[in-house]
Image (tube, rainbow, N blue to C red):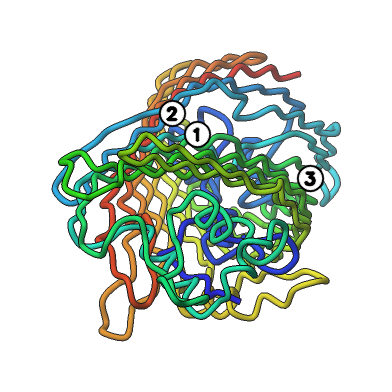
Amino acid sequence: MKKITLTISLIVAVMQLLVSQNDVDALRYTATTFGGTARYMAMSGSFGALGADFSVLSSNPGGIGLYKKSEFTFTPAFYLGETRSTYNNTVARDSKSNFNMSNVGFVFASERNEKSIVRNWQFAIGMNRLNNFNNRMIMQGFNSENSIIDTYVESADGIRYDNIENDTWGEYAYDLNLAWNTFAIDTIPGTTDQYFGAIPPGGGVFQRKDVETWGSMNELLLAFGTSIGDRLYLGASFAFPFIRYFERSTYSETDKENNIPGFKSIYVFEDLRTNGTGFNMKLGMILRVTNFLRIGGGVHSPTWYGMRDYWSTEMETEFDNHEYYSSYSPYGSYDYDLETPWRANASVAIVLWRFMLINAEYEYVDYSIARLRSAGYNYIDENDAVRSKYTEGHNIKLGTELRVGHFALRGGFGYYGSPFANAENGEKINDGEKLYYSGGFGFRDKNFFVDLAYVRSETNLDYYLYGSENIAVNPVKNEHFTNNVLLTLGFRY
């Protein structure tokens, strides 16, 4: 079976024999961020010791214990993802936007009993958004060193051509069979298992890859909590995250300078769709040490996902003699399981009368212990890659709110540490750090509130168009930016 590495594009897998799930997928669905109401987002999700906001139930369910009245919220949002890509000194930009629902939540708070140590209890049901996958990238540049066809030649060498030619459903159906059918590769005359490519090594091509992704990760919550003596607030939640991820890419190599005899272009079209549902549990608490000092903490179990991937590949080639070839793979699918890591967080808040709130929060997660599993495949290589490429994540969030009468002004900052480990030479395998800047304002009276927030994130992440242990390709340097505008309407009764 071919090796699956970080430098190979996502869909190189085959149904049952060569699966597409790898360390990249494990990280995508493990590296969640904060999402929910505009108030919570305006403070960069730093709310763990404050409570009484529906979104905090996804990080510290102990926050439900501070509710004294029932509440309903919903939060429509506008999202814009932007990417600036640099490949071999060529810069390209693209973006994608969408409207979505960041939060819908209902909290029921029982009547308070001031004479009892248990002041009241609460129940909540609703949804928070944990990830938005909408993005579009253009990566392009001239490469005089190698071609994606070189990886097909390397993979095919030693395999009889008739095994590749006749394999329309198995191990070679999604790459080598297509390359053979479109004459991207052919056998060296006089051999049956040695190959050459339509582009000679170092031929020089203009390469481009367009990648569009969309979908989201949302979490349905059922939470329960209580207030004990208005000093200790406890909460627990049962969460059911669900994933919808779509990726469509077009990769091309063209002979723009007409220096490759016979060859004109190759196109590779790939489609991937992933659906998943999961379950996790969370416990949390907030302790009001004094009237102005609170501490909080939460622990999250792993999320156990049941996942299904669907994928397909198409390849087209065109030559200078006007011959055109195309070949299609079957539509593949595979069921598997994903177990994400435990998570833990701790926070401290200062409440200065009714004038100012400050919250600082720390979260710990070890990305290297995520695991892929299935009944028909052991994922040994992929899980080894997760262990070696990823490491512990340390995330820090700061948020503040200033109140003047019914009005509030908010701001926040978030730092999500890189999930990538160091390579053998001590250098970071990839960047992946994320920075969040946020702000907003709101209006609240006794029974109604409205909040507005803006959140911007920045991260740098390398992307490899293709590659192998023997064929090195320069990484695409991607700068990702997201912009999120949210409006929350809430009713208390």
Residue at coordinates 35% horizontally, 56% vertically from top-left?
A: 198
- Label 2 Cα neighbours within 10 Å, binned few <14 / some 14-19 / many ≥20: many
Could you say where residue 86 lies in the image, as x and y percent from the top left? 22, 46
- Place residue 485 in its image quadrant: top left
Q: Earlier in the sequence, mark 2 or mark 1?
A: 1
Identify which amino acid the numbered label 3 is placed on.
Ala
Q: Which quadrant holds the C terminus? A: top right
Q: Amino acid at mark 1?
A: Asn
Q: Secondary structure at mark 2?
A: strand
Instruction: Give the x, y percent position of residue 248.
Output: 53, 38
From this viewpoint, is residue 411 visible? no
Numbered tag placed on residue 193 in the rendering: none
Residue on which the image places disc 3: 223
Q: Is residue 291 above or below residue 190?
A: above
Instruction: Tell which of 75 and 246 is nearer to you.
Output: 246
Q: Residue at x 39, y 38 (%)?
A: 210
Identify the residue at horizontal 27%, vertical 82% (top origin).
426
The disc label shown at residue 484, or none: 2
- Checking the image for residue 134, the label placed there is 1
